[in-house]
Amino acid sequence: MAKGCFLSVVVPMYNEEEVIEVTYRRLKTVLDSLGETYEIVFVNDGSRDRTADIVRNLCATDSSVKLVEFSRNFGHQIAVTAGMDHSSGRTVVLIDADLQDPPELIADMVARWREGYDVVYGKRIERKGESAFKKLTAAMFYRLLRSMTSVNIPVDTGDFRLMDRKVCDALTSMRERSRFIRGMVSWAGFKQTSVDYVRDERFAGETKYPLRKMIKLSLDAMTSFSTKPLKIASVLGFVLSAIGFVYLFVVLYQHFFTHSTQQGWTSLVAISLLFHGITLSLLGVLGEYIGRTYEESKGRPLYLVSEAINFASIEDEPSRERDIVKVGERAYR
Ligand code: UDP
Ligand code: MG
């Protein structure tokens, strides 16, 4: 099942030893029932547990299983990107390793693709087993993002989706570092539709998305798809300096025509605190953008591969040469 299979399934993994074998088996059942050629591209995002060993064993017995091993943890969105880079299917499915996205839905997605859609994304009508905090922040985030950007990013969708090869190629041609794949798919356009599903509980283990990673993803999404925070910053700056300017006249009037300047102390401190706070937070907004511009300007590869199993080496496949990494004697994408 080497080149040009029908369906590639991309599975990013970070410390998923408890689930990965079950995930493999459930995927396999669904994929076999489709009666098409397929490959499962597992991307090991620097796991520190036995995840890679388990997949390596699967690779040895099943040539449709492929493993891309990162040199360290590069993050979920980058891992998904690497999986897409290494996929060869006519269609590509992105799915989490923890079985929160039901593999059985892939059959429905393929059916919609056959109807002529290029992107079929899963829309979560319910999220099971996730904390109220996560649900609330996620709901708020999707709606805030929607109001901030001109790209129409559907609410309540994750990365669980099927894409046509041309959409996958469009995405992998975008080499930006701050990646928010859902947004990039929306940006790409094409004919898109959704299938509803209930997001299950994690099969085992705990979330690999702590608050810190959630915040980073939201900031990446905001800064990649909206410059509104910058505009808000400048509008706010303008309005506040106008207020400050008017107040200057009040202060001068008080100084020259009244004897009440001593009393100004309170307002002075209040204003100083307010303005310092605002200035610092606006600097923070600028910093978020500048930092990302700096990261992009370095032009480093998005990830480094330490090992790639069950892939044809790059010499057999000269058409693709993105992110070539040499492993010993052989070069891999
Ligand atoms: N993941 C990854 N790298 C990371 C964090 C997560 O590849 O640094 C993978 C993880 O193994 C899983 C998917 O991304 O397959 C989604 O992570 P998780 O299920 O922990 O997120 P949640 O569903 O809780 O938002
Ligand atoms: Mg999960």
Image: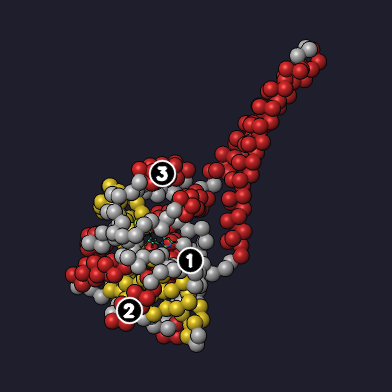
Name the residue beneath numbered marker 1: 73
Label 1 secondary element: loop
Q: For this rendering, which residue is in front, 304 or 236?
A: 304
Asked if the residue under mark 2 is in contact with the one under mark 3, i.e. CB atoms within 8 Å, the reply is: no
The N terminus sits in image quarter? bottom left
Which of the two labelled residues, at mark 3 and mark 1, occupies the earlier sequence position? 1
Disc 3 crowd rating (10 Å Cα; few below 14, some 14-19, many 20+) is few
Label 3 secondary element: helix
Q: For this rendering, which residue is in front, 268 or 86?
A: 268
Name the residue beneath numbered marker 3: 137
Three-letter code, disc 1: Asn
> Is label 1's Cβ within 8 Å of ligand 1?
yes
Quadrant in the rendering for residue 190: bottom left
Task: Answer left or right for 265 relative to 12.
Answer: right
Which of the two labelled residues, at mark 1 and mark 2, occupies the earlier sequence position? 2
Three-letter code, disc 3: Thr
